[in-house]
Amino acid sequence: MQHDVRFTRETRDLPPVDGWRRIEPTGYAHTSCSCGLDTGRVPDTEATSTARTHTAA
Ligand SMILES: [Zn+2]
């Protein structure tokens, strides 16, 4: 089984300053993989460690 792990850090919009769009991390992230793994919305640290350890298993 090939693992194509995708890690997405969740961000939220902040009020624009001088017309510039601003975002900041919410502290949550999402890790999924082509093998069917899907953490859903979990704390950033959990999504990161899942992505790191997933392919080592
Ligand atoms: Zn996988």
Image: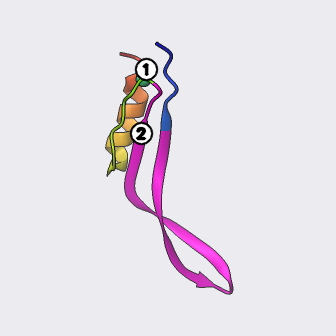
The image shows residue 30 at horizontal and vertical percentages of 40, 45
In the picture of the structure, the residue carrying the numbered disc 1 is 55
Mark 1 C-beta to ligand 1 under 8 Å: yes
Local packing at callout 1 (Cα closer than 10 Å; few below 14, some 14-19, many 20+) is: few
Q: In this view, does 11 lie above or below 48?
A: below
Q: Is mark 2 on a helix, strand or loop?
A: strand
Please tell me whether the stretch drawn in magenta is mainly helix, strand or loop: strand
The image shows residue 44 at horizontal and vertical percentages of 37, 49
Q: Is residue 20 above or below residue 26?
A: below
Residue 31's disc is: 2
Q: What element carries label 1?
A: loop
The image shows residue 41 at horizontal and vertical percentages of 33, 50
At horizontal 39% and vertical 28% (from top left) the residue drawn is: 36
Residue at mark 2 to residue at mark 1: CA–CA distance = 12 Å
Q: What range of the chain is rendered magenta? A: 7-34
In the image, is 34 to the left or to the right of 46?
right
User: Which of the two residues, 48 or 2, is positioned nearer the viewer here?
Assistant: 2
In the image, is 33 to the left or to the right of 43?
right
What amino acid type should be assigned to the residue bearing mark 2?
A: Thr
Q: Is residue 20 magenta?
A: yes
